[in-house]
Image: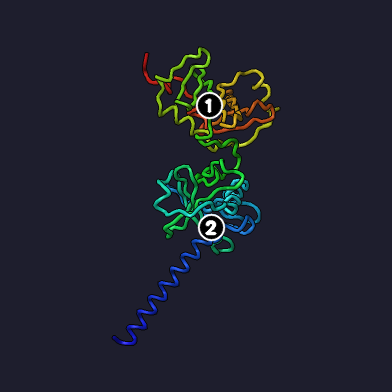
Amino acid sequence: MSRSWVIGVFVVLAATVVMLIWHKSRKEQGIEDIIPEGYSKIDRVQIVGSFDTLLFERIDSVWYYGAEQLSTRAVKNLILTSANLSMKSIVPFEDIGRPEFAADFMFMFRGKEAGHFTFQKSDGGYYIYEAQDDYAYGVELVGYEDYALEKIFSTELDHYRDHLLVSLLPVEIKRIEIDPLEGEAFLVKDEPALTFMLQDSAKDLSHCADTMQVRMLFSFFNALRYDRQIAPKSIEDQINSELPDAIIRVVDRNDSAYRFEVFPWYNQGNGEPDMFKCIVRYNNNNSAYYIMNYYYLDLLLRNTKAYLNDCD
């Protein structure tokens, strides 16, 4: 056996031992090395979701997606929540369950990485980990243990855009009441079972409900945005003389209510309503009128029959 062969084996074994010690040390060190230090130490954020990659950049105190100005509050919430995550456990990766939601978040400062992890929700718990690891850290946000963190760690560009009016995840919604443009007013709730009821007659049509179409309603209150706020004085004659085309009321699981009264917007100068935008009075507030795109409201204004199958 040559001396050089023995030395080579020793070097390989020593390197392996060092790597194992480093791996164990980093694992036990916790999440401090993979989460951002704080808001002021971040000027770029990259989010990689299932379908898109988003890159946000801070210039002075303003966050941008390309040339589009973003909601500072939404981006700041993401960074501060990441920085304040608390480790609950260290779990072998194969034990954390199938992901209900997962995305990669990288934070940078002056061109250098300042935090990088995959955020995952599985079996009702939240985990973060690095791509090469065989374990994950169970995490929580102390003081907000019951909060849906996937709402903050969103991969949707709309979540970070400005002019956010309401953002509710389907799991946060307790009840939806809609008085649509056509058809009878109805109420929908999802617990203990899916319920579809006509409000005026109190007729329960749950057995006739198109389950997929009704459940879709619960997803349309995530990131509702407006184009701009409008001065009440400029539309007071119209609002005082017209009934709304539709009324939508949502109640969340904390029993907070959100009410939208939808009016046509006559901005063409020819007495015809705009085909793509409408006026929304929010929460019965006579000073809170917004121009909104029907893109956000169209499915909420359908005829009642759109949510029912043919049945007796």
Q: Which amino acid does label 2 sit on?
A: Ile
Q: In which quarter of the image is residue 230?
A: top right
The N terminus lies in quadrant: bottom left
Q: Which of the two residues, 133 or 223, is positioned nearer the viewer here? A: 133
Coordinates of residue 4 in the picture (x, y in percent): 34, 86
Q: Which of the two residues, 100 or 94, is positioned nearer the viewer here? A: 94
Q: What residue type is labelled 1?
A: Arg
Residue shown at 55% from the left, 48% from the top = 140
* Outermost residue to the bottom: 3
| SS at badge 1 | strand
Coordinates of residue 273 in the picture (x, y in percent): 56, 25
Relative to 167, does residue 200 appear above or below in the rendering?
A: above
Relative to 17, does residue 285 appear above or below in the rendering?
A: above
Residue shown at 62% from the left, 36% from the top = 228
The residue singled out by tag 2 in the image is 31
Q: Name the mark on residue 175.
A: 1
Q: Name the mark on residue 241.
A: none
Coordinates of residue 255 in the picture (x, y in percent): 60, 29
Marks 2 and 1, how far apart in space? 38 Å
Q: Which of the two residues, 34 or 157, is positioned nearer the viewer here? A: 34
Residue shown at 49% from the left, 50% from the top = 127
Q: Reading the chain from its start, which is encountered first: label 2 or label 1?
A: 2
Coordinates of residue 200 in the picture (x, y in percent): 53, 13
Query: How many badges with numbers are in the image?
Result: 2
